[in-house]
Amino acid sequence: MKITSIVGARPNFIKCAPLSREIRKEFNEVIIHTGQHYDYEMNKVFFEELNIPEPDYHLDVGSGSHGYQTGEMIKRIEEVLLKEEPDLLLVYGDTNSTLAGALAASKLHITVAHIESGLRSYDKSMPEEINRILTDHCSDVLFCPTETSVENLKREGVMEGVYLTGDVMVDALKENIKIAEKKARILDEMGLKSKEYYLATIHRAENTDDFERLENIVDAFCEIGNLVFPCHPRTEKSLKGYGLWDRLVDNVRVIKPVGYLDMLMLEKNAMKVLTDSGGVQKEAYIFKVPCITLRDTTEWVETVEDGWNVLVGADEEKIVREANEFEPENKQRNVFGSGDSSERIVKIVGGL
């Protein structure tokens, strides 16, 4: 069996890595990198450190509007699929690359399998939510990370080809935190002590493109103090454009974006995490770090139900209160699996 995997941004590669290693024990795999994001860490060192196979194709689509980017990727992916003629196409998560791959393959009658199916925030203003829904509804095989994601699909009438496998991110984090603990030196370099600082990230348009929301978040961060903030380039541009940059850097430890291994170390050792990132919410949960989510909805509802994540939107008072007071009261359930999702997925693929 020939399997083609579509990736385009760092989260895709992280999820692909453990699964790809299992796939290659049994099948022939071709990896297509759409080039959706140029990532400063998407270089040879990144692939070598995390033992990720080099992509067979680089499509170099680059940035652009959602429509332009997705359309270009569909065209270029289709050309590769016509050449390679795979039996199965794998897509990951909720990026534009995910949707483009699923659409291109389904139009060519190639079986589509979606890793991380069934996630829903029920907020259609998020581009990722549209990508998830459309990808799920044109996929033939749906690998769900949680019981909630299975139920979400059932409510939408999707019941065939659905498998509860656990989350490949657990597989990835178990492997990569070991690498990070050996190689990453960021705590020492920054003079940080474990469980004595807050970690924050902001990058979603709902926060960065809305002055009132962004100002509320900045004011909350300044009041909390002792906060490390790796700042996304788009967020920095918005902060400076709105005149909030100086206020922030006077009160918060703002740093440039960090590499994946450094980020894992910052997450694992933080006292609490404040974020609007879906991936960081889940990573914080897996690391057993309390998370304060700067959004009104989340696709990772299990982290909230389990009492390890709290939604505060952009409410300054709530952000400060939860940063000071929020403590999980419950033991975690095993909602994302135990780190064997890649093996389970490959076994299912072998039986298709």
Image: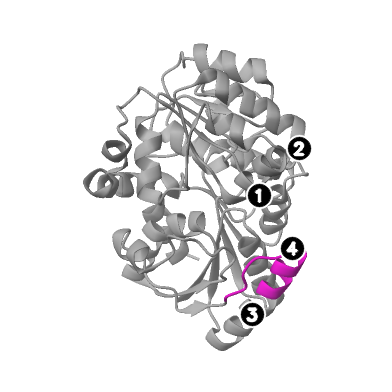
Q: Nearer the viewer, mark 3 or mark 1?
A: 3
Does the rendering let one see residue 313? no
Report helix, strand or loop for mark 2. loop
Q: Say which label, 3 or 4, has the lower sequence index.
A: 4
Asked if disc 1 and disc 4 are in contact, CB closer than 8 Å, the reply is no
Q: Which mark is residue 65?
A: 4
Kindly identify which residue carries mark 3: 76
Q: Say which label, 3 or 1, has the lower sequence index.
A: 3
Q: Say which label, 3 or 2, has the lower sequence index.
A: 3
Q: Nearer the viewer, mark 2 or mark 4?
A: 2
Find residue 37 and report its image quarter.
bottom right
Q: Residues within 10 Å of mark 4 (few under 14, many from 20)?
A: few
Report helix, strand or loop for mark 1. loop
Report helix, strand or loop for mark 3. helix
Identify which residue is drawn at 65% across, 40% down: 239
**Residue interval drawn in magenta:** 60-73
Q: CA distance from mark 3 to mark 1?
A: 31 Å
Report helix, strand or loop for mark 4. loop
> Left or right: 336 with respect to 154?
left
Q: Nearer the viewer, mark 3 or mark 2?
A: 2
**Disc 3 marks which amino acid?**
Arg
290 or 105: nearer the eye? 290
Asked if disc 3 and disc 4 are in contact, CB closer than 8 Å, the reply is no
Which percent across, then down, holds residue 205? Answer: 70, 44
Residue 67 colored magenta? Answer: yes
Asked if disc 3 and disc 2 are in contact, CB closer than 8 Å, the reply is no
Identify which residue is drawn at 73% across, 61% down: 66
Q: Say which label, 2 or 4, has the lower sequence index.
A: 4
Q: CA distance from mark 3 to mark 2?
A: 34 Å
Kindly identify which residue carries mark 1: 159
Q: Nearer the viewer, mark 1 or mark 4?
A: 4
